[in-house]
């Protein structure tokens, strides 16, 4: 059998591929599942990044490292909250002052939810979040705070029994939904609206089932809901059935009673 010389030019019709050399970056090499060729092959080895001293640890600012941080937040959240039991997430403004009407309502929501057998989950900050945590704590129930890193430091309020701090909004928001059986929403700003509309979207698209959403403060929420009906629905941007995604009430008693009734009549698959 004739010897086949893979380096020969005997088949002129087959285009030859450039052979990497030291001039263009060295021999091809692998870095885990990644294959590096030409100029990329000259990059330092992963072990070099790990073992060499570096006065500027830029690896902590790379996307692969962020993936590990994100993973760690999910692992920490799942591990900490997996045995929490039935819970309701309570949202509202961090700017709600102590002594105000809605602060008092938030406290009552926390107390009533604990009385109904639920843990209370909030964003862990001041204002309406603090109120709900305080009501839950004083009622002897589980008071949970899921904090977030912000440019203006808020810190965990003193009524949180179990607190987790997150770097990433999306990881934190996953915990609000995954470990809650419903939302109670007090008056709030952009953050509260973000959480509210995300919950509505998840229910609308059936990503979550049996998930009551209650808004407390009819006067506060009615202008927004009128816009939803008179603009979104009128322009065909939502279906009429979507108006049933939320329930507006004025008192903590009504809110908690609605949550209890809804969660008892529906069972998630």
Image: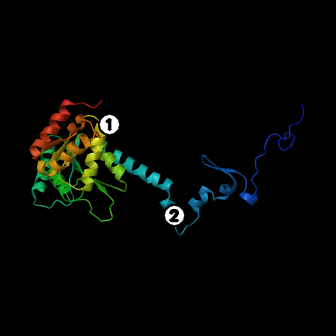
- Return the x and y of residue 127 as percentages of the image width and height: 18, 59
10 on left or right of 179: right
Alpha carbon distance from label 1 to label 2 = 40 Å
Q: What element does badge 2 sit on?
A: helix
Does residue 234 appear to the left or right of 43 in the view shown? left
Residue 48 vs residue 234, the one in the foreground: 234
Q: Position of residue 126 (x, y in %)?
A: 21, 59
Tell me the tag on residue 58: 2
Q: Which residue is mark 1?
A: 205
Residue at horizontal 59%, vertical 56%?
46
The kind of secondary structure element at disc 1 is loop
Residue 115 visible: no
The 10 Å Cα crowd at callout 1, few under 14, some 14 to 19, many 20 or more, is few
Q: Earlier in the sequence, mark 1 or mark 2?
A: 2
Q: Residue at x 12, y 39 (%)?
A: 257
Q: Residues within 10 Å of mark 2 (few under 14, many from 20)?
A: few
| Residue 183 x, y percent position in the rendering | 22, 44
- To which quarter of the image does residue 128 belong? bottom left
Q: Is residue 41 visible?
A: yes
Residue situated furthest bottom in the rendering: 55
As drawn, which residue projects farthest toward the front?
A: 235
Percent from the top left, x then y, of residue 44? 63, 59
Location of the N terminus (image quadrant):
top right
The quarter holding residue 148 reads: bottom left
Q: Nearer the viewer, residue 184 or 197?
A: 197
């Amino acid at each position: 059998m004739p010897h086949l010389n893979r380096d020969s030019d005997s088949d002129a019709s087959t285009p030859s591929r450039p052979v990497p050399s030291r001039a263009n970056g060295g021999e091809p090499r692998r870095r885990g599942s990644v294959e590096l060729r030409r100029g990329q092959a000259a990059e330092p080895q992963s072990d070099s990044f790990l073992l060499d001293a570096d006065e500027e640890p830029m690896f902590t600012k790379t996307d692969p490292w962020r993936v590990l941080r994100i993973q760690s937040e999910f692992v920490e959240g799942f591990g900490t909250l997996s045995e929490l039991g039935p819970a309701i997430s309570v949202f509202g403004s961090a700017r709600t002052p102590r002594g105000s009407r809605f602060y008092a309502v938030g406290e009552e929501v926390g107390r009533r939810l604990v009385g109904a057998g639920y843990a209370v989950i909030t964003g862990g900050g001041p204002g309406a979040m603090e109120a709900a945590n305080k009501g839950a704590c004083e009622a002897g129930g589980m008071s949970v705070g899921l904090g977030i890193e912000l440019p203006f430091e808020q810190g965990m309020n003193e009524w949180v029994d179990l607190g987790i701090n997150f770097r990433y909004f999306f990881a934190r928001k996953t915990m609000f939904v995954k470990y809650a059986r419903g939302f109670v929403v007090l008056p709030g700003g952009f953050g509260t609206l973000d959480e509210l509309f995300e919950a509505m979207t998840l229910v609308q698209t059936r990503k979550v089932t049996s998930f009551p959403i209650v808004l407390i403060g009819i006067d506060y929420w009615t202008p927004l809901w009128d816009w939803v009906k008179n603009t979104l629905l009128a322009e065909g941007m939502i279906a009429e059935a979507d108006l049933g995604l939320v329930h507006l009430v004025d008192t903590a008693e009504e809110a908690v009673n609605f949550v209890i009734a809804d969660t008892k009549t529906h069972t998630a698959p």
